[in-house]
Image: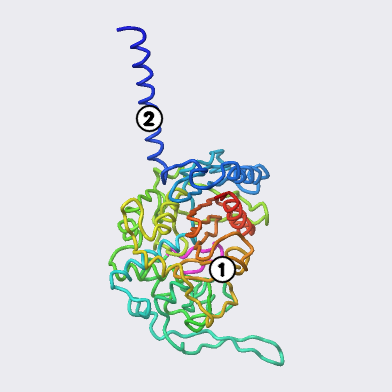
C-alpha cells in the first residue's frame, strides 16, 4: 500500500469522523441549524445579543442566561452566558434546566385545547361541569363610603359561572393571592392553601382534587367575563385536564405534548439524575436587594401546577414555539390543528372586558397587546413600545424566562434565566428588539 493511498484513506477517515460528529451535534440541537444570512438574518447583528448579555453578566445583573433564536424553522443563534449556579461555580450550558414558572401556562392551555379538539370540552362549558366546587360561585365585591373613603367588601352571587374560555383568557374572576387587593379573596386563598405569603406563586402543596375543591369554594374577585385579571386560572385548567382525561397533568402532557415534540427535559419536577443541570438565581436580587426564593423542584409536587410549576430547557421550549409557529406540528408530530392555533393566538377580550390590569403592561411594560387563549397577542404594528408584528404571541415566567413567536417574520425566540428581578420586563423588551434588528431581508 503506497503512502499516497494511506494518506488518502486517512483523510477520508477524518472526513467521515467529522461528518459523523457534525451529524451528532446537529441531532442534539433543538432544530436544524443554518447560517443566519441563509434565512435573512445578520450574523454581525445577532452578535449584539452576545455583547449585551456578556455585559449584563459581567456587571453581575444576571447570574447567567441561555438565548436561542430560530427563523424559518432553522436555529441561527444559540448561546449560553455566565453561571448556571453562581454559588457552585457551574457554568451555564445550552441544556441547562430552568424553573419556567408562568411559561408553564401556554403548555397547559395547549393541553386543554387538545381536549377541546376531541370534543370532550367546549369553551362555553361551565368549569363546574368538570369541577363541581365551582358551581354557584360568590363574588367579593367592594363598596365605597363616599364620606370616609373607606372600602369594605361583601359577598354577592355571581351573575354567571366561569367558563372554560374564561379560564383560558383570565376572565374567570379567579385571582392570584400575590396580586389581588381583595382581602376576602386573599384570605380565602391562604386558608385554601393555594397562596403562601412566604413564597410567591407556589400552589403545589395540595393534591390536585383537593386544590380544585378548595379554590372552587373561595370567592371570586370579579364577576366572570368582566375583567382581565392574571390568576390561578391555569392551575384550574390543569385540574380540568385531569378530570377529563383521568390522568395526572404531567402524565397527560408527557404523552400528548412533551413526548411527541421530544421535549425530553420538560416536566413538573427535576429527577436526581438531572439535578446538576438546574439553574439557580443569585441569593439576593441585585436590583432590589430582596432575597430570591424559588420553588423546590427536586421532588414530585402535591399537584402539577399548570400556572407556575414547570421546568424546561431553552431547546425544549424552542421546539414547542416552532410547533405553534408551524400551525401545530413539528417533525411529523401534530399537537394541534392550524385553526386551533389561530384561535388561541387571536383576541379573546374585545371591547367589553375591563383591562384595568393590562396584559401587555404586565408582561412588557407597554400597551398594544391583548390576550388570546393562554397567550399574549399583539394587536398591530404600532402602539406597543417594542419591536414586533401583528399576531405575534408570547408569554414569560416569574423567574426570568420568556418566549415569543412572530408568524409574519417566521421567528421563534427563547430567553432563559433565573432572575426574578423587577427588571424582567426590561430584559424581555431588550431581547425582542435585539432579535428584530437582526432581520435584514
Q: Are marks 1 and 2 in contact (CB under 8 Å)?
A: no
Using a 10 Å C-alpha cutoff, classify the residue at mark 1 as few (fewer than 14 neighbours), some (14 to 19) or many (20 or more): some
Using a 10 Å C-alpha cutoff, classify the residue at mark 2 as few (fewer than 14 neighbours), some (14 to 19) or many (20 or more): few
Q: Label 2 belongs to which residue?
A: 19
Q: Is residue 13 left or right of residue 200?
A: left
Task: Compare marks 1 and 2 and give the one earlier in the sequence.
Answer: 2
Q: Examine the image and state in which quarter residue 343 appears.
A: bottom left
198 magenta-colored:
yes
Q: Depth check: give the residue in front, 341 or 106.
A: 341
Q: Label 1 belongs to which residue?
A: 380
129 magenta-colored:
no
Label 1 sits on a secondary structure element that is loop
Label 2 sits on a secondary structure element that is helix
Q: Is residue 127 above or below residue 52?
A: below
Q: Examine the image and state in which quarter residue 274 appears.
A: top left
Region in magenta: 194-205
If the image is split into quadrants, where does the N terminus sit?
top left
Q: Is residue 392 above or below residue 36?
A: below
Query: How many discs mark residues in the rendered view?
Result: 2
Task: Estimate the spatial distance between the alpha carbons at disc 1 and disc 2, rounded to whole Å.
Answer: 45 Å
Amino acid at each position: 500500500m503506497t503512502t499516497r493511498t494511506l494518506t488518502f484513506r486517512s483523510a477520508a477517515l477524518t472526513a467521515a469522523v467529522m461528518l459523523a460528529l457534525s451529524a451528532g451535534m446537529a441531532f442534539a440541537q433543538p432544530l436544524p441549524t443554518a447560517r443566519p444570512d441563509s434565512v435573512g438574518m445578520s450574523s454581525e447583528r445577532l452578535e449584539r445579543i452576545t455583547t449585551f448579555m456578556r455585559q449584563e453578566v459581567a456587571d453581575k445583573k444576571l447570574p447567567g442566561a441561555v438565548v436561542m433564536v430560530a427563523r424559518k424553522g432553522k436555529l441561527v443563534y444559540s448561546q449560553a452566558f455566565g453561571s448556571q449556579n453562581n454559588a457552585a461555580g457551574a457554568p451555564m450550558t445550552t441544556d441547562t434546566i430552568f424553573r419556567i414558572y408562568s411559561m408553564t401556562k401556554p403548555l397547559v392551555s395547549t393541553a386543554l385545547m387538545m381536549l377541546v379538539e376531541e370534543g370532550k370540552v367546549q369553551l362555553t362549558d361551565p368549569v363546574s361541569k368538570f369541577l363541581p366546587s365551582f358551581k354557584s360561585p360568590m363574588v367579593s365585591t367592594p363598596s365605597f363610603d363616599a364620606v370616609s373613603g373607606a372600602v369594605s367588601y361583601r359577598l354577592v352571587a355571581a351573575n354567571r359561572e366561569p367558563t372554560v374560555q374564561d379560564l383560558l383568557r383570565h376572565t374567570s374572576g379567579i385571582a392570584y393571592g400575590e396580586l389581588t387587593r381583595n382581602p376576602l379573596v386573599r384570605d380565602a386563598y391562604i386558608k385554601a392553601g393555594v397562596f403562601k405569603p412566604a413564597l410567591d406563586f407556589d400552589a403545589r402543596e395540595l393534591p390536585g382534587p383537593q386544590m380544585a375543591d378548595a379554590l372552587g369554594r373561595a370567592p371570586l374577585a370579579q364577576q366572570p367575563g368582566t375583567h382581565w385579571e392574571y390568576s390561578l386560572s391555569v392551575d384550574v385548567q390543569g385540574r380540568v385536564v385531569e378530570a377529563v382525561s383521568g390522568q395526572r397533568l404531567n402524565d397527560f402532557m408527557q404523552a400528548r405534548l412533551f413526548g411527541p415534540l421530544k421535549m425530553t427535559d420538560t416536566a413538573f419536577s427535576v429527577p436526581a439524575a438531572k439535578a446538576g443541570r438546574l439553574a439557580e438565581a443569585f441569593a439576593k436580587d441585585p436590583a432590589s436587594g430582596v432575597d430570591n426564593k424559588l420553588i423546590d423542584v427536586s421532588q414530585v409536587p402535591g399537584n402539577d401546577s399548570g400556572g407556575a410549576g414547570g421546568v424546561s430547557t431553552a431547546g425544549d421550549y424552542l421546539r414547542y414555539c416552532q410547533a405553534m409557529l408551524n400551525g401545530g406540528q413539528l417533525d411529523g408530530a401534530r399537537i394541534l390543528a392550524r385553526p386551533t392555533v389561530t384561535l388561541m393566538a387571536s383576541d379573546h377580550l374585545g371591547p367589553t372586558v375591563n383591562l384595568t390590569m393590562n396584559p401587555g403592561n404586565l408582561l412588557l411594560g407597554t400597551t398594544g397587546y391583548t390576550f388570546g387563549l393562554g397567550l399574549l397577542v399583539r394587536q398591530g404594528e404600532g402602539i406597543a413600545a417594542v419591536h414586533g408584528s401583528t399576531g405575534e404571541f408570547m408569554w414569560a415566567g416569574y423567574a426570568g424566562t420568556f418566549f415569543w413567536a412572530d408568524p409574519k417574520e417566521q421567528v421563534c425566540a427563547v430567553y432563559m434565566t433565573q432572575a426574578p428581578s423587577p427588571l424582567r420586563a426590561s430584559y424581555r423588551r431588550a431581547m425582542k428588539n435585539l432579535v428584530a434588528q437582526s432581520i435584514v431581508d
